[in-house]
Image: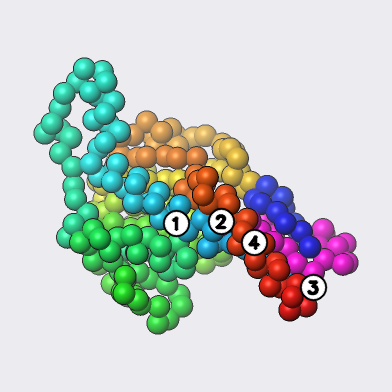
Amino acid sequence: GIIIRSRIPLDAHFLEKAKNLKFIARVGAGMENIDIAKAQELGIKLINSPEGNKDAVAEHVIGTLLVLMNRLFISSNEVKKGIWLREENRGEEILGKTFGIIGYGNMGKAVAKRLSGFGCKTIFYDIKPNLSDEFATQVSLQELQENADILSLHTPLTEDTLYMIDEEFISKMKKNFYFINTARGKNLKTSALVNALKSGKIKGACLDVLEYEKTSFENLETKNEDLEYLLNSEKAIITPHIAGWTHESKIKLAQVIVDKILAFTAEN
């Protein structure tokens, strides 16, 4: 077996030569650095550990959203410079709003659970049916677009989710809304986001992932005008892919992987 993180690509050429490989364990959630189709064709078991950092991601979502909606970074930096502005830094509450989630797996559910104490209505869209629970109600994508005041993305990167959030998607959102992406950068078309921020359609964005990240996530591949706008805009909070990156999640991710490997080897 092989245990990897995001920096190691395992393509078809590698897998075909790994004649004795029985499993690949990815410490984390996303498996886009693995040729999944080839692994399945060769009968190689794929293991990941999204359960290990779901709590970290959920806390990051809520934390960055509160900072954004209440202008906490902005007002704090102003006070440190001797600027005291109250009306200009009037915030918004989550209470009474409709919080929309796309992707109701480990991360989406963890976010919904934490929202239960905020007095908002939580709805979600997922391609799998019958996932409603005590924390959130499943709706169609159209219903989510018609009702959400806040949108949080929790989808893997697939052919179906590549640039899912684009100009057309944003235009179908009935309300002006806040946007959060802690999933994958290429789920979002950055140019569409920037245009929506400029127009006010998107009121603010919390981005822990960027379209321009390297596939291994350790840095950015490129910079351009859209990225420069985000880095300099008061409407955007940008973090370096750390939503699931806590001291606690490091341990939990490893433990989940160990438990799953032991279960697999016991069965085989």
Q: Is residue 185 visible?
A: no
Residue range corresponding to the magenta coloring: 13-36
Q: Can you give x and y, in whole percent of width and height, for residue 251 in the image?
A: 58, 52
Q: Residue at x 24, y 24 (%)?
A: 78
The tag earlier along the polypeptide, 4 or 1, is 1
The residues bearing labels 1 and 3 have C-alpha atoms spaced at a distance of 34 Å
Task: Report the residue marked by disc 1.
Answer: 55
Q: Position of residue 47 (x, y in %)?
A: 66, 66
* As drawn, 153 above or below 141: above
x, y percent for residue 89: 18, 35
Question: Disc 3 or disc 2, which is closer to the eye?
Answer: 2
Q: CA distance from mark 4 to mark 2?
A: 9 Å
Distance between the alpha carbons at the discs numbered 4 and 1: 16 Å
Amino acid type of disc 4?
Ile
Q: Earlier in the sequence, mark 2 or mark 1?
A: 1
Q: Which mark is on residue 253?
A: none
* Location of residue 265 (image quadrant): bottom right
Q: Are marks 4 and 2 in contact (CB under 8 Å)?
A: no
Q: Are marks 4 and 3 in contact (CB under 8 Å)?
A: no
* Quadrant in which the N terminus appears: bottom right
Decide which of 133, 259 is in the foreground and name it. Answer: 259
Residue 42 is labelled as 3
- Neighbor class of circle 2 (other Cα within 10 Å; few <14, some 14-19, many 20+) is some
For disc 4, the neighbor class at 10 Å (few under 14, some 14 to 19, many from 20) is: many
**Residue underneath mark 2:** 252
> Tag 1: Cα neighbours inside 10 Å, few (<14), some, or many (≥20)?
many
Q: Residue at x 23, y 23 (%)?
A: 79
Indicate the secondary structure of the residue bearing disc 1.
Answer: helix
Circle 1: residue type: Asp
